[in-house]
Image: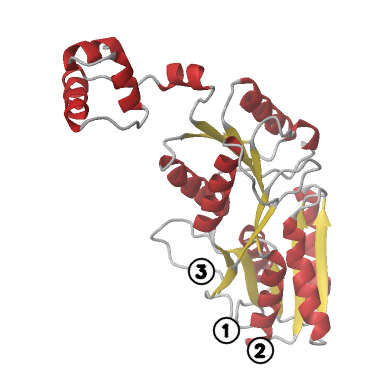
Amino acid sequence: MASIKDVARLANVSVGSVSKYLNGGKLKEKTKIAIEEAIKELNYEKNIYATGLRTNRTHTIALLIPTIWNPFFSELAFYIETELRYYQTKLVLCNTINNYENEVAYITMARQNKIDGLITLSYSNVDAYISSELPVVSIDRYFSEKIPTIMSDNFMGGKLAAEKLQLAGATKLAFIGYGSIYENSTRDRYRGFQDYCKTNKIDWKSFYYEGHHREFREQLSLFVQEQIINNETDGIFVVTDEQAMEVIDLLHQNGKRVPEDIQVIGFDGSKQSNNSPIYLSSIRQSVPEIAAEAVKCLFKIIEKKEVRLQTILPITYQPGTTTRD
């Protein structure tokens, strides 16, 4: 394998000039062309790990997500990796499967292996492992240390969902959600929904559960039968798209049609693939913008620049076939 010295010898330039070229420095055009021709002839590949030892950078970023099976998390990983290419940085994807021990292990790995930084979506009790010693940006979740958080305007999203259901003719509304016991911005979706209903004097019910998902599913089934079916609720806002699909499945099991009998709005707006049609009416998070802001913020921390501790991004309504828009 060719070395930087081999490139310098063939190009008839100094090793310092080759190093300067590889790191984006300015050189005379004649020198630049000679180095490029030598690199091509020798099939030279830059050793980013050796460079990392000298600069204390590895040009790798870790992304901690609960599961790759969720379309929102998958889409976010896609756009974060795309953004990192502009910084010539690689992505290490940490799929925790919603497991606390996995999250701790990945965070420890990021710190011990000198990864340049961490972007995390964590809903577990990992606060003690998150330290400002490692550049960290959080999405949705608040930590006790001063860690910058990127989030959508969840409060406005909850209000918008209630408004859209009302405009579509729903008069008895319900909020359904399952979430973490640790404080995070997704709780504002319920607060926004509640605020709109109270302000506009709309009849509404709510079911928000913090605990094991299996227990949520069991309690949800009872809530749908007692508070949705028997109460003649005709509009439901669900905290995520994934949970909205569970609710729709339960409605179908109870003989209710969507949207003819009951209209449903989710939150995320991610598609299963680029070519799949929009099925679920949803409050759309701007995933490309979340990714861009998270990456930009992380690199500011790495470069020891000042950053905002909270960034709130706008949401939009994405109509689908589960409302009568």
Q: CA distance from mark 1 to mark 2?
A: 8 Å
For label 3, the residue is: 279
Q: Nearer the viewer, residue 294 or 32?
A: 32
Q: Residue at x 75, y 71 (%)?
A: 192
Q: Secondary structure at mark 3?
A: loop
Q: CA distance from mark 3 to mark 2?
A: 19 Å
How many neighbours does mark 3 have within 10 angstroms: few (below 14), some (14-19), or many (20 or more)?
some
Label 3 vs 1, first from the N-terminus = 3
Q: Secondary structure at mark 2?
A: loop
Q: Quadrant of the C terminus?
A: bottom right
Q: How many marks?
A: 3
Q: Residue at x 66, y 31 (%)?
A: 134
How many neighbours does mark 2 have within 10 angstroms: few (below 14), some (14-19), or many (20 or more)?
some
User: Label 2 near label 1: C-beta < 8 Å?
Assistant: yes
Q: Quadrant of the N terminus?
A: top left
For label 1, the residue is: 324
Image quadrant where residue 300 sits: top right
Q: Which mark is residue 169?
A: 2
Horizontal side of 323 relative to 189 (left or right) equals: left
Q: Amino acid at mark 3?
A: Tyr
Image quadrant where residue 220 sits: bottom right
Q: Amino acid at mark 2?
A: Gly
The colour scheme used to paint the residues is secondary structure
**Vertically, is 308 above or below 34?**
below
